[in-house]
C-alpha cells in the first residue's frame, strides 16, 4: 500500500481507494486556473464545487480575512454580538428578492438547509398549525448531507444509505431529454410536472405539510433546469394550500444564472432562500438563510418577552472572519458587475460554445443557462450512469475540470471567465468526447 492509500484523510464523496491509488492533487489556484502538483495548469470549469464564482485567489478577500482575524478573530454570537454581523446582514439583504429581509447564518449549505427546515416547523407551530411537519422535495434534488437535507433530497444513494429521518415525500424531477434535448435556456416542455405537487398534497393533506423545497435548477442532480412556467406554478400551488416555498440557492445564488439569485432571474419569490458557496467566493465557509418578514415576525411574536425565540444556532454563526470575507466578496461582485455578467454576452457565448458540441455522435443533449451547463453523453450499456465520471477523468487529463454526474459532464465556470477561455474549454472537451468509448 502506498503512503497515500494509508493516509489518515478520509475523503468525502470520493472512492478513497481509487483516488489514493492515482491521486489528483491541486497545489495552487488563480483566476480560472488550477495548478496541479508538478506544475500542470487546468481550467477550473466548475468554479471548484460551483462556488468560486469570482475566480480563485482574490487578494481582496485574503486581505480582509487576515485583517479581521487580527482585529476580532472570534466572539460569541449567543447573547453577545459584533457589529460586522449586523452590517453584513443589512448589506446582504439588499441583494435578496423583496421581502426576504432577515438572515440566519450557518457554515455550510447543509446547515442552511437544516436551518430553513427548522424555521418552517417553528413558523407553522407559531401560527397554530403544528400538524404541518412534513416536507416535499423533488427527485434529483440535492440539499446537503444532514438528516433534513437527505430526507428532502432526491439523490438515491444519499437517501438510501441512511433512510428518511425527517418526514418527506418527493415530486417528480423535470429532466426530460426526449422532449427537451438541446434546449437553450429554460426548456419548453414540462410545466405540467408542477401538478405533481397537487398529487402529493391530495395524498398527505395540506394540513400535514410545512414546506416545499426545491433548487431553482438542480445542480448536483445534473444541471436540471426548470421548464418554462414550472416555478411559477409551484408558487401558485403553494399559495393555494398555504405551504411555504423554500428555494435552495446554494448553487444558483450569487450570479450563476445572470441575477443575484435564481428566484430573481426566474421571477418567482419563495418564502426562504438558502445560500452558501459563492457567498464568500468559497474562501471560508459561510451559509445563510434569507427569510421573509412575515415568517421572522411570526416567530418573534410567538415567544414570550425575554425568551429565546428560536432554539437553534451554531458556534460559528456570523463568524467575524467569514463576514469579513463575505463583505469583500460583495465588494468584488458589485464592483465588477459579476452578479449579472452571466446574462450578457458571456452567457450567450457559453451557450453557443456548448451547443457547438451538439454535432457529435455521442452527445445526446446540451443544456445551459447563465454560466452553467451540462453535456449529456450516450453511454455504452456497461457504463450507464458512470460515463460522466469517465469523461470527467479524461477531461482532467486534457486540462479541464468538469464534473461527471450520471452520464453528463456538468460545468459552472467562474463568472470572470473570458470568451477565449470558454473556447479553450470546449475545444478540449471536443477532443475528450471524440475519444470516449
Ligand atoms: N444545497 C445545494 C443546492 C447544494 O448544491 C449543496 C452542495 O453542493 C448543498 C445544499 C450543501 O452544501 P454544503 O456542501 O456546503 O453543505
Image (cartoon, rainbow, N blue to C red):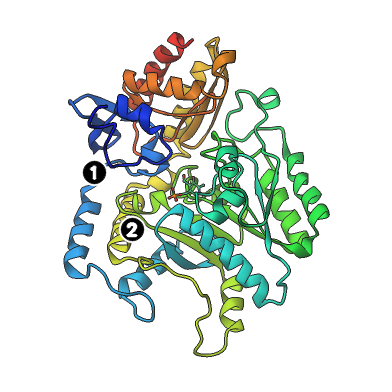
Q: Position of residue 28 (x, y in %)?
A: 21, 36
Is residue 108 in view?
Answer: yes
Question: Is residue 423 left or right of 58 when viewed as pictured?
Answer: right
Give the numbered dot on residue 57. Answer: 1
- How many marks can you see? 2
Gap in Å between the C-alphas at discs 1 and 2? 14 Å
Q: Position of residue 162 (x, y in %)?
A: 57, 47
Q: Nearer the viewer, residue 144 or 186?
A: 144
The crowd level at tag 2 (other Cα within 10 Å; few <14, some 14-19, many 20+) is many
Q: Residue at x 62, y 51 (%)?
A: 164
Ligand 1 within 8 angstroms of badge 1 C-beta: no
Q: Nearer the viewer, residue 256 or 77?
A: 77
Question: Is residue 301 left or right of 33 when viewed as pictured?
Answer: right
Q: Which quarter of the figure has residue 390?
A: top left
Q: Residue at x 49, y 10 (%)?
A: 437
Question: Is residue 97 left or right of 424 when viewed as pictured?
Answer: right
Amino acid at each position: 500500500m502506498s503512503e497515500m492509500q494509508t493516509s489518515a484523510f478520509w475523503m468525502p464523496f470520493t472512492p478513497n481507494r481509487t483516488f489514493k491509488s492515482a491521486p489528483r492533487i491541486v497545489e495552487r489556484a488563480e483566476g480560472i486556473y488550477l495548478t496541479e502538483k508538478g506544475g500542470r495548469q487546468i481550467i477550473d470549469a466548475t468554479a471548484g464545487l460551483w462556488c468560486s464564482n469570482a475566480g480563485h485567489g482574490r487578494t481582496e478577500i485574503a486581505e480582509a480575512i487576515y485583517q479581521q482575524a487580527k482585529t476580532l478573530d472570534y466572539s460569541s454570537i449567543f447573547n453577545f454580538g459584533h457589529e460586522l454581523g449586523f452590517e453584513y446582514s443589512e448589506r446582504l439583504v439588499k441583494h435578496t428578492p423583496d421581502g426576504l429581509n432577515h438572515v440566519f447564518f450557518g457554515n455550510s449549505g447543509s446547515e442552511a438547509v437544516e436551518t430553513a427546515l427548522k424555521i418552517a416547523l417553528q413558523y407553522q407551530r407559531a401560527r397554530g398549525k403544528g400538524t404541518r411537519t412534513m416536507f416535499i422535495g423533488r427527485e434529483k434534488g440535492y440539499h446537503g448531507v444532514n438528516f433534513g437535507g437527505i430526507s428532502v433530497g432526491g439523490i438515491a444513494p444519499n437517501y438510501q444509505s441512511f433512510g428518511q429521518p425527517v418526514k418527506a415525500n418527493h415530486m417528480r424531477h423535470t429532466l426530460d431529454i426526449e422532449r427537451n434535448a438541446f434546449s437553450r435556456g429554460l426548456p419548453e416542455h414540462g410545466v405540467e410536472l408542477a401538478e405533481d405537487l397537487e398529487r402529493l398534497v391530495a395524498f398527505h393533506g395540506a394540513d400535514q405539510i410545512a414546506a416545499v423545497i426545491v433548487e431553482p435548477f438542480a445542480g448536483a442532480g445534473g444541471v436540471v433546469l426548470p421548464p418554462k412556467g414550472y416555478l411559477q406554478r409551484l408558487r401558485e400551488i403553494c399559495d393555494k394550500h398555504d405551504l411555504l416555498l423554500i428555494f435552495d440557492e446554494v448553487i444558483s445564488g450569487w450570479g450563476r444564472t445572470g441575477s443575484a439569485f435564481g428566484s430573481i432571474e426566474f421571477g418567482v419569490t419563495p418564502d426562504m432562500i438558502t445560500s452558501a458557496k459563492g457567498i464568500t467566493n468559497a474562501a471560508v465557509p459561510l451559509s445563510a438563510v434569507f427569510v421573509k418578514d412575515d415568517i421572522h415576525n411570526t416567530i418573534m411574536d410567538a415567544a414570550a418577552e425575554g425568551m429565546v425565540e428560536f432554539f437553534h444556532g451554531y458556534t460559528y454563526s456570523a463568524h467575524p472572519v467569514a463576514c469579513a470575507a463575505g463583505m469583500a466578496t460583495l465588494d468584488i461582485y458589485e464592483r465588477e458587475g459579476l452578479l449579472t455578467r452571466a446574462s450578457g454576452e458571456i452567457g450567450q457565448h457559453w451557450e453557443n460554445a456548448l451547443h457547438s458540441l451538439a454535432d457529435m455522435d455521442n452527445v445526446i443533449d446540451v443544456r445551459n443557462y447563465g454560466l452553467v451547463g451540462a453535456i449529456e453523453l450516450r453511454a455504452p450499456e456497461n457504463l450507464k450512469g458512470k460515463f460522466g465520471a469517465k469523461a470527467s477523468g479524461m477531461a482532467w487529463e486534457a486540462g479541464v475540470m468538469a464534473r461527471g454526474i450520471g452520464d453528463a459532464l456538468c460545468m459552472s465556470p467562474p463568472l470572470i471567465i473570458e470568451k477565449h477561455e470558454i473556447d479553450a474549454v470546449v475545444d478540449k472537451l471536443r477532443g475528450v468526447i471524440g475519444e470516449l468509448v
